[in-house]
Image (cartoon, rainbow, N blue to C red):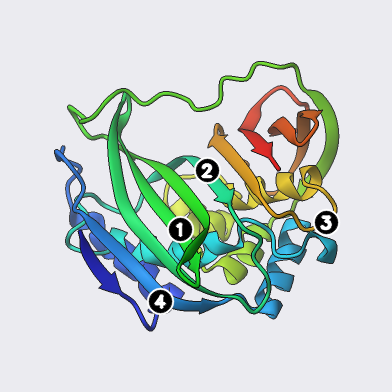
Amino acid sequence: MKIIEVKKLPSALALNLGALRSSSKRSGAVDALPEVTYVRPSVTIDAKRVKAYAKVCGFTEAHGVPMLVPHMDAFPLAMMLFGSKAFPWPAMGLVHLANSAKLLKRINVGDKLRIEVRTGELYKHDKGQVFTLHARALRDGVVVWESTWTLLRMGVKQPRGPEYVSQINDERPLAHQADFFAGAGIGRSYGRVSGDINPIHLSALTAKFLGFKKAIAHGMWTKARALATLMPREAVEQAEVIVEFKTPLFLPARASLWANRGEGESVFEVRNAKGDKPHLRGLVRY
């Protein structure tokens, strides 16, 4: 496993330009991803950034550090991988199919974390090649958070690996819980906080340039917005959440949250305003 230590991150603009330059690659089949781990050796959980993230996603101060905050610190490492010569496919057009995150120990403002992102496994999909990335955060050498990102490179013929299957098979009936509004500017707001400035999220104009009828909400914002309602109103010591992204949430939009809530867990969906089309489906335990 090759380890690449990143002490100073490129800017968000530079990362996205690197992803854009990768468009000259072809979407051919590979037997495995290159074995590489990108590392940020010391990342401080910043109070101002946590507050800004909480405001954009709907968390309160009582929630403490929301469990998806480390994803923002891991994201630029994934972008560096996508823009590198070692990554076999174009970065533009990758589809985020699913995302899981596990909080193993409570994270606090001021914590210094080691952030790692490594390449994972391949899976077959009828639309192309599914691949995974594995991220984790360590505090004083102890893993406190880990995550798996499942992505699809469409158009790859004869994809490798076992068949991709859903991780969420709970069919309990869901009841309407809440409604929320995703404004036209939420992609820009979340992009400023997270560093994810993919043009498909920023405006209708930039999204149309890439073939979309309107801007699309970040899947990780939609996931966080659901957790802001479903999680307890205090900081938790441990939690796990898995979501699968179903259909784009075009901006602006009204969305509805549906769930079956039990003791310490919820099965949930974010749906359109009518409640008849899912944007994501998930399971959270705490």
Number of residue marks: 4
* Lateral position of residue 193 relative to residue 151, left or right: right
The residue labelled by disc 1 is 136
Considering only vertical position in the picture, is 240 above or below 110?
above
| Classed neighbour count for the residue bearing mark 4: other residues with Cα under 10 Å, few (<14), some (14–19), many (≥20) | some
- Please tell me which of labels 2 and 1 falls first in the chain: 2
| Residue of label 3 | 234
**Considering only order in the chain, which callout, 4 or 3, is on the residue closer to the N terminus?**
4
Mark 2–mark 3 distance (CA, rounded to whole Å): 21 Å
- C-beta proximity under 8 Å, tags 2 and 4: no
Q: Is residue 144 left or right of residue 27?
A: right
CA distance for labels 2 and 4: 23 Å
Rendering quarter of residue 41: bottom left
**Which residue extends farthest bottom?**
8
Residue 268 visible in the current orientation:
yes
Q: Amino acid at mark 2?
A: Ser
Q: Are marks 1 and 4 in contact (CB under 8 Å)?
A: no
> Distance from label 3 to label 4 (Cα)?
29 Å
Residue at figure coordinates x 74%, y 72% from the top left: 51
Q: Which mark is residue 17?
A: none
Question: Measuring 17% from the left and 27% from the top, which residue is drawn there?
Answer: 158
Helix, strand or loop at disc 1?
strand
Q: Could you tell me how far apart the alpha carbons at marks 1 and 3 are, in whole angstroms?
A: 23 Å
Q: Which mark is residue 100?
A: 2
Image coordinates of residue 239 in percent, x first then y, are 65, 47
- The residue beneath circle 4 is 41
Q: Residue at x 77, y 58 (%)?
A: 235
With 205 as the anchor, is 13 left or right in this view? left
Q: Can you give x and y, in whole percent of width and height, for residue 252 in the image?
A: 70, 49
| Residue at x 37%, y 49% (from the top left corner) | 133
Q: Position of residue 60 (x, y in %)?
A: 83, 61
